[in-house]
Amino acid sequence: MNRREALQRAGLVLGFAISAPVISGILNGCKAAPELTYKPEFFNIDQARIMSELAEVIIPKTDTPGAKEAGVPHFIDQVMRECYKKRDQDRYLESVKAFDEESKALMGDSFIDLTPEKQLELVKKLNKDAVESWRNIESVKKKLIGKEYNEPFSSDIHKEYGAPEMAAAPDSLKLNMYFQTGNFNMTVDKQTNKIIEIFGKPDARHFFLTTKELTVAGFFTSEPGATQVLQYEAVPGAFHGCVPLSEVGKTWATS
Amino acid sequence: MEADKNTTYDAIVVGTGISGGWATKELTEKGMKTLVLERGRMVKHPEYPTATKDPWEFENGDRPTQHDLERQGKQNRTGYTVRQSTKHWFVDDIDNPYTETKRFDWMRGYHVGGRSITWGRQSYRLGDMDFNANVKDGWAIDWPVRYKDISPWYDYVEQYIGVSGTVDGLPQLPDGKYLPPMELTCVELDLKKSMKEKFDRALTIGRTAHLTAPLAHSPQRGTCQFRNLCSRGCPYGAYFSSLSSTLVAAEKTNNMTLRPNSIVHSLLYDDATGKATGVRVKDAETGEEMEFKANVIFLCASTFGSTYILLNSTSTRFPNGLGNDSDQLGRNIMDHHLNVGASGDIEGSEDKYLSGRRANGFYIPRYRNVGKDKRDYLRGFGYQGGGSRQGWQRMVAEMSVGKDLKEDVTKPGIWTIGMGGFGEFLPYSENRVTLNKDMKDKHGLPTLTFDVELKENELKMRKDMKNDAAEMLEAAGVKNISTNDNPGGPGLGIHEMGAARMGKDPKTSVLNGFNQVHACKNVYVTDGSFMVSSACVNPSLTYMAFTARAVDHAVSELKKGNI
């Protein structure tokens, strides 16, 4: 039974009808928790709700199905559970918290309690920040990964990205450090002294971008995504390398 | 027919991949009763479990799980082999361990058809530039053959398997007879034009073992449907594999007995006659040991497979492995080094797109150390590449979200183009595999230890491979060019060769010019083991040609009573 029904019945029991405006006022003040479209195995209920709502804002139902209808929440749950390493799983779960804090700080409420318009506004802002921050990390990766963490190179790194704070190494074969100015973590293999990993903080942008990546991947490999939003041919029969786009129509789902 | 321990077969073939399938076809078609022993499981064309599945039928968007990566961690080093759609064609690394003195990425699968199911299908010929290379450079030993010896066999195998491509008239890339070529895309045509005008270098469509027209002598094979799902196995039989082609021909003769799950671990050798008399087999499922006899043996178990069998076949006559008087068995290992090149974005051609999915790219034949060109390294490289438009994957890093994202994705992204080099790898005596009797695999058999690395010549060459690619793209107007150079381990080219090289002199080679073991002439080795230099072109077509030629020799020698 949903809350609206429950209130109406309560009114009847009390001997008067609760008016529609009152009902809607009460309902808007405590927005009903969105129903989950799948059974979470990796996330808890609250995390699953946030992830599902975010996925649906990123790819909403229009005249074609959205993320939920295409099974994206289940996809994200399963991929996290089966394909991600523990460290990356932990970072993702930590970042859900950060994301919801960001929602409260910037938009005044938990993500699932925001109106659809406010959700989209937050998502647009985070998208811009997250993509920029990802691009920075990618360019740092290109510069540093595979190089040896030795003088004079290490001094150059400190000059550009700030003095490193050493973090507790998860095992004795790796050295972890965090660069304040550059805002990234770096892992050095103690045996080879080579830089083997660069990664950002598990903040709201990390949650947003990871969810976006998995939403896009889950959606466009789904049947509605591939066949209704894009176009898909199981057996093309021929290949033509240079044809007018107008003849093809829209983007192919697979290559 | 069941494999019979009491029969002496005319021939035994070990392995059913590229070379094993060919040896089997040629032997059986020439009337030889042939026992074919494959260490892996049975696979029958067109039973490829994932071949016709749609994208949404794969778990996790086809990604490997952490469990997959635990079992197939080394196979995953390519970045593309361990997917839900293809992982069953690659070994479980825990069950099939090997030791790396230096990192070696050994990619293989154990099943009927071998890597002829998952191969890249690029098919080029070696020419005299390659056959002369060692003697010209004063490096390693001379090939015991030249192009004129092999060219009729290239003709023979090429026409049988069907190779799509163009005749290009380049001396460094001998032409064959081709089925109609696949199309180049708009941006590839632009690059081709720019390379000709600005560098006088060729860019051509890849020569690939796909049927772009029907093949009259193989009516069971269909033409390419441009699905680009080849490494799942092709239910149309449209690209060459043992399963769709050579083993079908062999089966028709009624001279073939195929026994899968049969791990040949050593040869039986009779010192009195100086001949191998058969093979020792361990059943992969039951562990039962058995022996089979034959008059001639073709080792086609892949370079490390065949080399292993020879190393593991010791006797008073051959304390270091059968045929290893030269101490060259297991040495001189080569591959092609790759994962180096450039890519970038293209402005324009927004009103053009493509249709169908081409399982092929463009090819840039070697131009370094060709003609008057002289570099500070020996040999050279070719490039494989492609240019296409970005798909939905680009949406992750773009600005639109919500309904805008759904609208924007329906327009394809910008055109991008890239190329990756395949570099020749010199033979070095110290690049070797050895037998390790202290570490056993899940069958209780010894394993291999790899001590192979890229050396100075290869590393010097990679500078050109990276810089030339960027230079050629820039000259064609490509923007935002990025380069890459990640050699990974040798083995990633999946073109391993050289461990039982052929040569004129038994003191410096294991095989003669007909792939016969010098010291035991009824054993032939026709997989990549025999290669004396690696050239820079994909080697499988060469293995097929040498195999057909070696069988012709073997049958003739048998008839003459010479073996």
Image (cartoon, coloured by chain):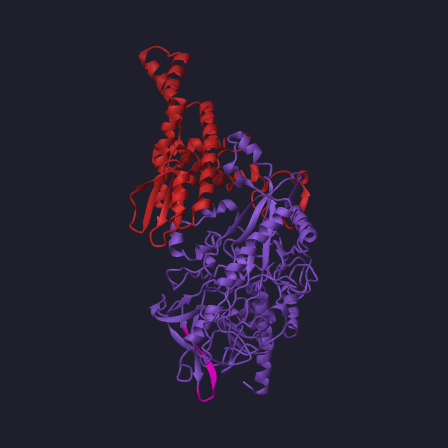
Chain colours: A red, B purple
Quadrant into which the C terminus of chain B falls: bottom right
Q: Is residue B514 visible?
A: yes
Q: Is residue A145 magenta?
A: no
User: Would residue B496 be found to the left or right of residue B71 on screen?
Assistant: right
Pinpoint residue A231: horizontal percent, then vertical percent: 59, 40
How many numbered discs, if any? 0
Q: Which residue is farthest front? A: A152
Seen in the picture, residue B75 relative to A218 is either above or below; the reply is below
Per the rendered image, the range of residues in magenta is B271-281
Q: Is residue B229 visible?
A: no
Residue toward you, B27 or A171: A171
Residue toward you, B232 or B142: B142
Quadrant for residue B268, please give it.
bottom left
Pinpoint residue A49: horizontal percent, then vertical percent: 39, 32
Residue drawn 46% across the image and 82% down it:
B277
Residue toward you, A96 or B491: B491
Q: Which residue is farthest bottom? A: B272
User: Would residue A242 be found to the left or right of residue A107 on screen?
Assistant: right
Residue toward you, B156 or A148: A148
Seen in the picture, residue A167 relative to A60 is either above or below; the reply is below
| Prevailing SS of the magenta stretch | strand
Residue drawn 49% across the image and 52% down it:
B85
Pinpoint residue B318: horizontal percent, then vertical percent: 42, 82
Q: Is residue B273 magenta?
A: yes
Pinpoint residue B414: horizontal percent, then vertical percent: 60, 40
Q: Which residue is farthest top? A: A16
